[in-house]
Image (tube, helix red, strand yellow):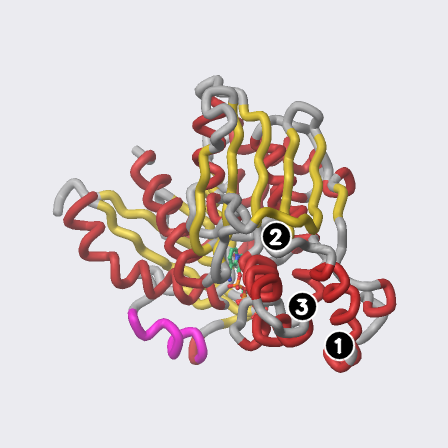
């Protein structure tokens, strides 16, 4: 097709999300070319140490190619390679969870890259970095899309941005932002199982981080809340979020993961006590709440009526209630799978396509 547009993607991170994304791109290729005149080419894929370079773009055998031909790399070599081949329409995808990698964003933008990220770090570092990143993007006329930072494939950030930009006054955002904590409290509240048993189930299903204390600490929910607040131009920092951690002091970071797993039954009594205090129509939910008017960000365990919007949640779904002036008492609600490699990779691909279509 003569007037097709070729997009050159450099993918950093080929773990769960990154590798699923490559497969989704390979599957979508012919449809994208036919329907949207887009050619998505991935000339470089990289993990934290190695990169595989192929000027024609990786093929279906990329895993073997990476194992056989990947080489240690530096970010400057990536930049040099795309310059040497005069690649246009450059998108760097951050599918890492790395703080170190986000330090490359500015350099990548200065060298012609747009950025699509599943990694929350760049949006949750100090506000100075957040602001400087946006100034650099503006200066170089580049885009940064990160829809999967909150709610994975669910359209949360775009919805909030659209409402905000159209002048709609968002008053509050409240919800269950974490798939693992959704599963844990949806099951614990309704079953007779102990808290540690439910936690163990969630871990076996691959819903929690390898160290479940990362979920239970509330930090991940706090990061998502911070990202939403900043979308609404609230200049706030991670340390401003009030977080009710669910990790008891005696099992905190000083305890090894092995010890935590062996002693997880110590969580059972306090959570059973909390459950006892509920009446029969109530359930426990771990929520994030952004009060826009008062500029407060809270992550906390609450009791909810079973029939309420948050109370009816099932499985490992996430849910976001967006209260605005026009929606009044009845918020706009977005609900669905808020984690998982398939939906997250799909969300990243959707950002890539949106960005690609905006390029001349
Ligand atoms: N999985 C989900 O459901 C989900 C949902 C929403 C958002 N996310 C976000 O998506 C991102 C990726 O998640 P994942 O589950 O795919 O993680 P993962 O399986 O742990 O994969 C991470 C990948 O990033 C690479 N990496 C780490 N540091 C790097 C660096 N400095 N430069 C280049 N590559 C680097 C790792 O390489 P090595 O193997 O060399 O370390 C690995 O290939 C995370 O930020 C996560 O929070 C995930």
Crowd around label 2: few <14 · some 14–19 · many ≥20 (10 Å): some
Q: Nearer the viewer, mark 1 or mark 2?
A: 2
Q: Kindly check if marks 3 and 2 are in contact, taking CB atoms under 8 A apart as contact.
A: no
| Location of residue 60 with respect to 226 vertically, above or below | below
Question: What's the distance in space between the residues labelled 1 and 2, CA to CA?
Answer: 24 Å
In the image, what residue occupies the spot 47% across and 52% down? 152
> What residue sits right under mark 3 in the picture?
212
Please identify the quarter of the rendering in which residue 229 is found. Answer: top right
List x then y, in percent, for residue 53.
41, 64
Q: Which residue is most to the top?
A: 167
> Magenta span has 89?
no
Q: Viewer-proximal residue, 5 or 290?
A: 290
Q: Viewer-proximal residue, 327 or 207?
A: 327
Q: Nearer the viewer, mark 1 or mark 3?
A: 1
State which region is magenta.
Answer: 60-67
> Magenta span has 66?
yes
Marks 1 and 3, the one that precedes in the sequence = 3
Q: Nearer the viewer, mark 3 or mark 2?
A: 2
Question: What's the distance in space between the residues labelled 3 and 2, CA to CA?
Answer: 25 Å
Q: Kindly check if marks 1 and 2 are in contact, taking CB atoms under 8 A apart as contact.
A: no
Question: What's the distance in space between the residues labelled 1 and 3, CA to CA?
Answer: 14 Å
List x then y, in percent, for residue 228.
58, 37
Q: Viewer-proximal residue, 286 or 97?
A: 286
| Location of residue 95 with respect to 243 vertically, above or below | below
Label of residue 194 in the image: none
**SS class, disc 3:** loop
Label of residue 265 in the image: 1
Q: Total label count? A: 3
> What residue sits right under mark 2 in the picture?
282
Crowd around label 3: few <14 · some 14–19 · many ≥20 (10 Å): many
């Amino acid at each position: 097709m003569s007037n097709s547009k070729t997009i050159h993607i450099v993918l950093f991170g080929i773990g769960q999300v990154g590798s699923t994304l490559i497969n989704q791109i390979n599957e979508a290729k012919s449809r994208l070319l036919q329907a949207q005149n887009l050619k998505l080419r991935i000339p470089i894929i990289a993990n934290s140490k190695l990169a595989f370079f192929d000027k024609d773009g990786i093929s279906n055998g990329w895993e073997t190619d990476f194992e056989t031909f990947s080489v240690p790399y530096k970010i400057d070599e990536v930049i040099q390679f795309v310059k040497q081949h005069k690649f246009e329409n450059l998108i760097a995808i951050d599918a890492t969870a790395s703080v170190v990698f986000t330090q490359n964003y500015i350099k990548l933008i200065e060298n012609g890259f747009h950025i699509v990220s599943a990694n929350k770090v760049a949006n949750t570092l100090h506000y100075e970095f957040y602001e400087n990143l946006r100034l650099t993007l503006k200066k170089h006329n580049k885009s940064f899309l990160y829809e999967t930072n909150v709610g994975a494939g669910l359209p949360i950030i775009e919805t909030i941005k659209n409402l905000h930009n159209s002048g709609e006054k968002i008053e509050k955002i409240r919800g269950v932002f974490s798939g693992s904590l959704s599963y844990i409290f949806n099951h614990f509240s309704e079953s007779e199982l102990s808290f540690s048993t439910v936690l163990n189930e969630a871990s076996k299903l691959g819903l929690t981080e390898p160290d479940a204390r990362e979920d239970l600490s509330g930090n991940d929910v706090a990061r998502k809340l911070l990202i939403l607040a900043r979308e609404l131009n609230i200049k706030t920092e991670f340390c401003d979020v009030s977080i009710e951690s669910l990790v008891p002091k005696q099992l905190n970071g000083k305890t090894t993961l092995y010890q935590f797993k062996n002693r997880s039954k110590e969580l059972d009594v306090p959570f059973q006590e909390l459950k006892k205090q509920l009446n029969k129509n109530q359930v426990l939910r771990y929520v994030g709440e952004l009060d826009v008017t008062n500029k407060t960000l809270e992550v906390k365990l609450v009791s909810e009526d079973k029939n309420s919007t948050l109370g009816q949640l099932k499985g490992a779904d996430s849910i976001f209630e967006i209260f605005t002036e026009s929606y009044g008492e009845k918020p706009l609600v977005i609900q669905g799978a808020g984690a998982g490699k398939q939906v997250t990779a799909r969300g990243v691909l959707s950002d890539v396509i949106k960005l690609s279509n905006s390029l001349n």
